């Protein structure tokens, strides 16, 4: 199938690498235009150049943005709206694992940092993008939560709390838009361990093979996921195929949450 998001103009945060870059590639491949936002502007520009070379000039644009900063959101969305001729999709993907240790060991500064990058970002992105999305209905917001937003562990208090907040904030946004009579849907995606640089600290500790095997043992499907597998879930939620799906969570977790 191709052209599943033809004509869609999608702003994706954290798009310089990992899941964000994979989603940007999928949007371009499926006929959409993509705005790649990231702190790492060189990385975002590199992916944008790759997509413009593959799919034609004007397919992708790169924006430097710190997703915790309201003024940077306002400026980046304004530019993306002008560059892409509108915005009909927002993917709040930028996030950090951050913050080591259990609740007694984690510093308040580390806790706040994770909450800021993972949650303030979704609040600010939706707050300032809805006015553009409303001009290009049907439109969609996709928030990248985690299976860790639904299932806790003993040593990631900030990550668990932040991803659970993204889960319910997505539903809040869905109900807000519906109440306003907007055809702007909002859903969350909950990946388990996916093969991206976010796993590098663990790979650094245990070695690549042992780290991935250790994670895979926790997944009923017996392996970690691929970025493309999350990208295809995002394509579904960004496209009009999911026109009646809002306020939902899509678990892409190899069966972990079924246990
Ligand atoms: N990979 C996984 O195993 C996994 C599992 C579940 C959920 N997730 C979530 O998916 C999302 C993407 O993760 P990933 O694995 O691709 O991570 P990653 O570390 O590979 O990429 C994250 C990107 O976000 C950018 N970023 C970080 N802070 C930012 C900020 N303040 N402003 C703008 N950009 C910023 C980074 O520069 C980077 O390009 C995150 O929200 C993460 O929590 C990942």
Image: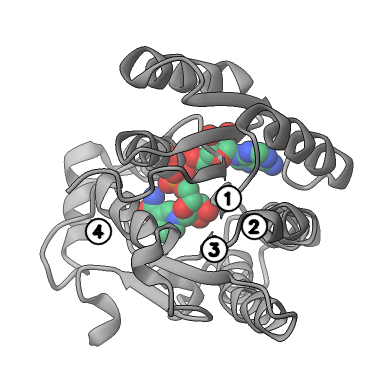
Helix, strand or loop at label 1? It is loop
Contact between marks 3 and 1 (CB within 8 A): the answer is no
Residue assigned mark 1: 95
- Disc 2 CB within 8 Å of nearest ligand 1 atom: yes
> What crowding class fits label 1: few (fewer than 14 Cα within 10 Å), some (14-19), or many (20 or more)?
many
- Disc 1 CB within 8 Å of nearest ligand 1 atom: yes
As rendered, which of 83 and 96 lies closer to the eye? 83
Q: Of callouts 3 and 1, which one flags the residue occurring earlier in the amino acid sequence? A: 1
Residue at image point 39% right, 17% down: 56
- Residue 162 lies, with reference to residue 234, above or below; the image says below
- Residue 171 lies, with reference to residue 145, above or below; the image says below
Q: CA distance from mark 2 to mark 4?
A: 22 Å
Judge depth for marks 2 and 4 and give the one in front: 2
Contact between marks 3 and 4 (CB within 8 A): the answer is no
Residue assigned mark 4: 215
Contact between marks 1 and 4 (CB within 8 A): the answer is no
| Left or right: 256, with 31 as reference point | left
Q: CA distance from mark 1 to mark 4?
A: 20 Å
Judge depth for marks 1 and 4 and give the one in front: 1
């Amino acid at each position: 199938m191709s052209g599943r998001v033809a004509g869609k103009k999608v702003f994706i945060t954290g798009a310089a690498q990992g899941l964000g870059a994979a989603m940007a590639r999928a949007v371009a491949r499926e006929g959409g235009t993509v705005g790649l936002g990231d702190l790492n502007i060189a990385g975002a520009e590199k992916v944008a150049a790759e997509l413009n070379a593959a799919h034609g000039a004007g397919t992708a644009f790169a924006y430097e943005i710190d997703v915790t900063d309201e003024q940077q959101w306002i400026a980046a969305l304004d530019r993306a709206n002008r560059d892409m001729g509108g915005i009909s999709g927002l993917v709040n993907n930028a996030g950090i694992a951050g913050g080591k240790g259990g609740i007694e060991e984690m510093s308040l500064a580390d806790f706040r940092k994770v909450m800021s990058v993972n949650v303030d970002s979704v609040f600010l992105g939706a707050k300032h993008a809805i006015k553009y999305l409303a001009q290009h209905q049907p439109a969609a917001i996709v928030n990248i939560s985690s299976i860790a937003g639904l299932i806790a562990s003993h040593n990631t208090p900030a990550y668990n709390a932040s991803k659970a907040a993204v889960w319910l904030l997505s539903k809040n946004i869905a109900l807000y838009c519906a109440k306003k009579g907007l055809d702007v849907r909002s859903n969350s995606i909950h990946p388990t361990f996916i093969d991206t640089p976010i796993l590098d600290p663990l790979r650094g500790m245990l070695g690549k093979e042992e780290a991935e095997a250790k994670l895979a043992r926790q997944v009923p499907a017996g392996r970690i996921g691929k970025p493309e597998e999350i990208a295809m879930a995002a394509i579904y939620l960004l496209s009009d195929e999911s026109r009646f799906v809002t306020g939902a969570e899509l678990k892409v977790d190899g069966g972990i949450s079924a246990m």
